[in-house]
Amino acid sequence: MAAPRIEFKDVGKRFPAKRAGETSVLAVQNVTLSIGDGEVVSLIGPSGCGKSTLLNMGSGLYLPTDGTVEVDGVRVDGPNRQVAFMLQKDLLLPWRTIRQNAELGLEIRGVASGERRARASDLLARCHLGGFENHYPHQLSGGMRQRAALARTLAIDPTVLLMDEPFSALDAQTKMVLQQDLAQTLAAESKTALLITHDLVESIALSDRVYVMSERPGTIIEEIVIEIPGRDDPMRRRRDPRVGAYVAELMSLLHVGERAAGEAA
């Protein structure tokens, strides 16, 4: 594996009690994982196991209670210019055009207007939004809005992309199209990415490796290398007969269906 771009070293996070009489919550513990340059890695696990907590620590929005997070060997101790975060909601500003939304991060960083415009226009074209630069968010479909959010995320040229279920609100067909766009864009930009998903096939189609987490307090229980070629072509990967075996392995690790079977018995 290439030298780590982002690395979690024996990381734990405990949240203090919100009110008197309540106990603190240990969200994650003893999490160690690393992602090399240009890798795409998925993180899956039960709801509430701390996946989003890990991404928040990776971006510097939370600080770990234990252990360290490093980007390019430098400890993350606050919001990091090298890390970009893409969420479930597009969070586009409704009063700005799509191009202006894509330029936002560059504008905050003081990049000259001509350079901002050129970078945003290029990324919007690569995200299949050419001709829609002057539209407003309410004029676009949900899938197009997510493409615009991806262009905005990539515009600041981050070292690492953190993505928290970016396609979960979309219908199945739109999701697959955007997965293809994302995979091709990440490959073209040689970006490193950590993706949270509850979609097992999505994790296989998009990733070089998949980390599986336990129930809370979340920790890594398995690392699975996806040995199917063509990570930049998830449509083709989905058709590979080996996908079924990977899904079965992930279902077993996550105990999918076991609780329901036990209750039925």
Image (spheres, rainbow, N blue to C red):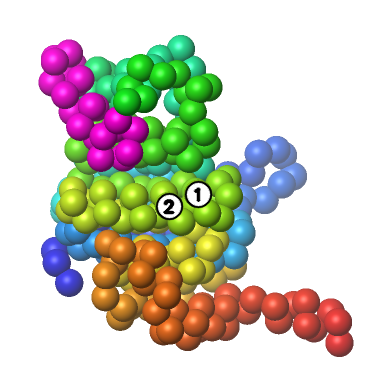
In the foreground, 98 or 196: 98
In the foreground, 83 or 136: 136
Q: Are the residues flagged by discs 2 and 1 in contact, CB closer than 8 Å?
A: yes
In percent of width and height, residue 23 lies at 67, 51
The C terminus appears in which quarter of the rendering? bottom right
In percent of width and height, residue 154 lies at 26, 38
Does 23 sit above or below residue 90? Answer: below
Q: Name the residue under label 1.
A: 174
Judge whether residue 246 can be spotted in this image: no
Q: Main secondary structure of the magenta part?
A: helix
The residue segment tinted magenta is 109-130
In percent of width and height, residue 165 lies at 49, 50
What residue is at 46 percent from the left and 12 percent from the top? Answer: 95
- Decide if residue 222 is on the left or right side of residue 38: right
Mark 2: amino acid: Val
Q: Name the residue under label 2.
A: 177
- Say whether residue 192 is magenta: no
Q: What element carries label 1?
A: helix
- Decide if residue 229 is on the left or right side of residue 91: left
